[in-house]
């Protein structure tokens, strides 16, 4: 059985790299993304197509199962926020083999996002340039739909403030987060407060410690029953991170997502994903894990292209990992490939379960 999975995964990888990717990369990245979103939604809506995709891609193994903050994950590999902005792909992503999906980022009001070119490939850097500006259908439409749906994997709701002039006012910005959290209280398994979007109006006001504290105070008041994560930027100094950690300790924050896109580049606006954020993300995971003695759950994201990349983040302190860019460059078969090879790495290191590897490179 295992050998068949290995052959299938290698075939998927060759087909993607030799045929699908060269064709897709001839077209505009956003157009390709829209095409795959429509296709994925269709495939996820029918039992027969779901079964077919599952046979072609899915791989699960008991050694990868985890229970984090009361949520059962069948494997630690999740789809990061920004790929499924309107929560239309959870159904098909469970057949592709993901352990969980983070939808959004969702905002209180529907938002068209920024104008002009919004995403591009930087092939030699294995990176994507992103300037979407939080386009999504708004919390009402999305959660009304999700309330009627059931999935076999957990999913998180990434919440950001609506990308508009008005929400630059901190009070309006906080109310924007709060109304999304209230509106979506019946859906999803965890929340992420996205305070690190690099391409929305007015920048990232809530990375400012004082405003961060005001936001967390209001969120705390809501007495949310689900775990709450904060998504951090890879561009903050250690001193700045220390301040945010101190504030997080006072409020009900269960963990951190390390990291969002980096703004440190010379392409003007927008942020970069992929290989460029890999090292920064790994360093931040390690730093927070050590500094807080493993008190917080860390979700590691940024530049995962292989099982070794995912394992490195887990050994640095991440309990779960997420990706987007790796899937664009290596295809949907990457998820099964990572999970399959993670099991091999666990066996090599004589661990019975992935949870035993979390944070080990810190000791
Ligand atoms: C096209 C695209 C859109 C994104 N949109 C969001 C978003 O809406 N919210 C968010 O928190 N992160 C967003 N991100 C950041 C990713 O979730 C992730 O943190 C980052 O891309 C690093 O992971 P990767 O290297 O595996 O892509 C986006 C990334 C990409 C590539």
Image: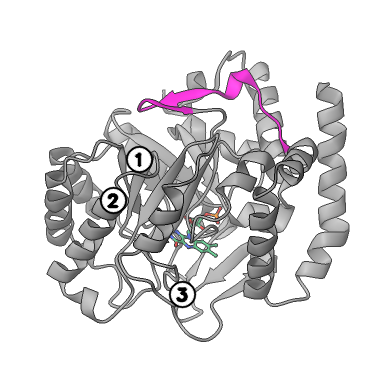
Magenta residue check for 64? yes
Separation of marks 3 and 1 at Cα, in angstroms: 26 Å
Of discs 2 and 3, which sits in the foreground? 3
Percent x, y for residue 34?
Answer: 63, 69
Q: Which mark is residue 287?
A: 1
Question: The magenta stretch spans which residues?
Answer: 58-72
Q: For the point 73% across and 38% down, which residue is it?
A: 54
Mark 2 and mark 3 lie on one chain; the one further toward the N terminus is: 2
Tell me the element at label 1: helix
Residue 126 visible to an observer of this rendering? no
86 or 159: nearer the viewer: 86
Q: Residue at x 18, y 56 (%)?
A: 212
SS at circle 2? helix
In front of the other: label 3 or label 1? 3
- Residue at screen point 37% across, 57% down: 233
Residues at marks 2 and 3, CA–CA distance in whole angstroms: 23 Å
Binning the other alpha carbons within 10 Å of mark 2 as few (below 14), some (14 to 19) or many (20 upward) gives: few
In the rendered image of this protein, does residue 103 appear above or below residue 346?
below
Q: Earlier in the sequence, mark 3 or mark 1?
A: 3
Front position in the image: 223 or 343: 223
**Residue 334: x %, y % from top left:** 70, 44
Secondary structure at numbered mark 3:
loop
Relative to 311, 268 lies left or right: left
Quarter of the figure with the C terminus: top left
């Amino acid at each position: 059985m295992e050998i068949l999975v290995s052959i299938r995964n290698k075939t998927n990888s060759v087909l993607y790299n030799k045929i699908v990717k060269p064709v897709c990369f001839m077209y505009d990245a956003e157009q390709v993304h829209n095409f795959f979103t429509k296709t994925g939604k269709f495939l996820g809506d029918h039992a027969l197509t779901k079964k077919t995709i599952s046979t072609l891609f899915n791989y699960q193994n008991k050694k990868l199962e985890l229970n984090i903050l009361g949520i059962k994950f069948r494997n630690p590999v999740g789809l990061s926020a920004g790929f499924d902005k309107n929560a239309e792909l959870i159904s098909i992503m469970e057949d592709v083999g993901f352990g969980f999906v983070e939808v959004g980022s969702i905002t209180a009001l529907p938002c068209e996002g920024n104008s002009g070119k919004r995403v591009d490939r930087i092939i030699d850097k294995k990176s994507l340039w992103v300037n979407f500006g939080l386009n999504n259908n708004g919390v009402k439409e999305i959660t009304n739909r999700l309330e009627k749906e059931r999935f076999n994997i957990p999913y998180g709701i990434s919440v950001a403030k609506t990308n508009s002039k008005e929400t630059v006012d901190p009070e309006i910005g906080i109310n924007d987060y709060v109304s999304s959290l209230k509106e979506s209280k019946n859906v999803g398994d965890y929340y992420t407060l996205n305070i690190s979007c690099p391409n929305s109006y007015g920048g990232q006001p809530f990375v400012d410690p004082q405003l961060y504290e005001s936001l967390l105070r209001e969120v705390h008041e809501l007495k949310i029953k689900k775990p709450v994560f904060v998504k951090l930027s890879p561009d903050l100094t250690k001193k700045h991170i220390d301040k945010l950690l101190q504030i997080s300790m006072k409020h009900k924050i269960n963990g951190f997502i390390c990291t969002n896109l980096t703004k440190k580049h010379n392409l003007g606006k927008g942020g970069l994903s992929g290989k460029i954020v890999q090292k920064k993300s790994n360093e931040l995971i390690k730093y927070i894990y050590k500094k807080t003695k493993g008190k917080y759950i860390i979700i590691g994201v940024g530049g995962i292209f292989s099982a070794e990349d995912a394992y490195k983040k887990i050994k640095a302190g991440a309990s779960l990992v997420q990706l987007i860019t790796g899937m664009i460059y290596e295809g949907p078969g990457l998820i099964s490939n990572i999970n399959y090879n993670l099991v091999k790495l666990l066996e090599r290191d004589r661990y019975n379960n992935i949870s035993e590897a979390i944070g080990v490179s810190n000791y």
